[in-house]
Amino acid sequence: MSEATVTVTDNRTGKNVALSIKDSVYGEAVVDIAGLPKELGLFSYDPGFVATASCTSAITFLDGPKGELMYRGYPIEQLAGKCSYIEICHLLLNGELPNTEQLRKFKHTITYHTMLNESLRNFFNGFNYDAHPMAMMCGVVGSLAAFYHDKLDIHDAEHRMITAHRLIAKMPTIAAACYKHNVGQPIIYPRNDLSYCGNLVYTMFATPCEDYEVDPVAEEALDILFILHADHEQNASTSTVRLAGSTGANPYACIAAGVACLWGPAHGGANEAVLKQLAQIGSVANIDRYVAKAKDRNDPFRLMGFGHRVYRNFDPRARLVKETCHKVLAKYGNDPLMELAMRLEDIALKDEFFIERKLYPNVDFYSGIIYKALGIPVNMFTVMFAVARTVGWISHWMEMMTEPNQKIGRPRQSYSGPQKRDVPPLVERK
């Protein structure tokens, strides 16, 4: 890191202020504007925080224009091709990929934390039979603090790591329990002889009536999807977890806040929207009409699964998830929606309208098709995302807890309401 300065001049007063510029090995340099309120009496105005770095982090880097994504310096393409999701969890939590012995111990720790307190299992009975799985997940994750409060000293490094292990381990069990309650089936206990994603498949689809064998194709597909969704820098839900954590809230409450944020259709519900839109288009014969609607500036219709808030190139995760999609459909039969998806992708990569606007397919474009092929219902798509992203959330929370000058998050505003006025007597109010 090198340091330089930029001088800002207040045209109202002529006063000059030198602001520190911090360069980075990757990505854009940042300007430290913390002194603006004191020196000039000004706050920055940045709706949606599109040009604001809210923190310094060593976990994930993405380059939108180049279409690059790295966890702890490792390119996502290499991680997805050479590592398991559980290795990625170790990497995000600890900063390094595990060696053989470290991986054995980490797997053992996660495996033996997958069960839920029996009273917590009973907690699901309080939800209506048709409750949305994400509604249940928000409540259950937040309630974990009531069941696992023995290691909740946020200033204790050991407590933080134990809590991280518990969250990563129990999220698949909670997700499967949400699904089972929603479909009216008994909750299934996890098995210690299964992998992380294998256990999720098993606890979702097994019943007490007969033996159930986990399909390795489904297991591998989930593992790849979870790797690709493990973290994505300072997105809305991760920023929410950090903001909640800045207050000193317990980590279970912080992750529950992340789950709630992810529930928004503009964030975690994108793959669900893609699937619904493909069903709406219905046939390859209708594609041209819908593409024309997407190009029409006077038509509010837009194609879901194309473009990204940050990426201005092909989403690197999209290439990987497309390969996984083909493997899944080869086992479970070709889905007619896949033909639609491939045709739309072909158009997006060749049509000047999409090329000029950098509207390339993103990771959500294919992930919903994979989930559908595996028999996972649409209302569980965002739950699966939450399971995968938990390790990213808790890693950012842990990183934030070690910052020496940690402050409570407190964004400011540009007030646009009425000017100061006196309160009139009740009888004089119109």
Image: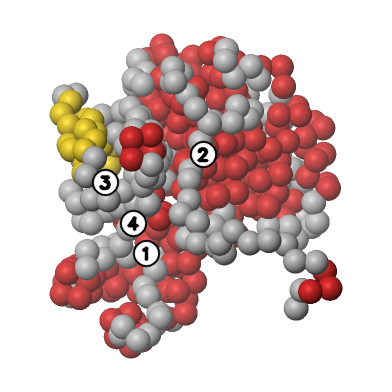
Quarter location, residue 258: top right
Answer few, some or many: residues within 10 Å of disc 3's Cα (few below 14, many 20 plus, some between 14 and 19): few
Give how far apart the Cα atoms at labels 2 and 4 are.
24 Å
Residue 405 visible, this orientation: yes
Image height of 143 relative to 358, above or below? above
- The residue drawn where x is 57% and y is 12% is 156
Q: Are marks 3 and 1 in contact (CB under 8 Å)?
A: no
- Depth check, mark 3 against mark 4: the one in front is 3
Q: Which residue is mark 1?
A: 305
- What type is the residue that disc 2 sits on? Arg
Q: Horizontally, is 96 left or right of 223 in the view?
A: left
Which callout, 1 or 2, points to the residue nearer the camera? 2
- The disc, 3 or 4, on the residue closer to the chain's N-terminal end is 3
Question: Does residue 195 appear in the picture of this structure?
Answer: no
Callout 3 secondary element? loop
Q: Which residue type does callout 3 highlight?
A: Thr
Q: Is residue 267 left or right of residue 74?
A: right
Query: To which residue does mark 2 refer?
Result: 410
How far is the residue under mark 1 from the one under mark 2? 33 Å
Q: Marks 3 and 2: in contact by CB < 8 Å?
A: no
**According to the image, label 4 marks what residue?**
309
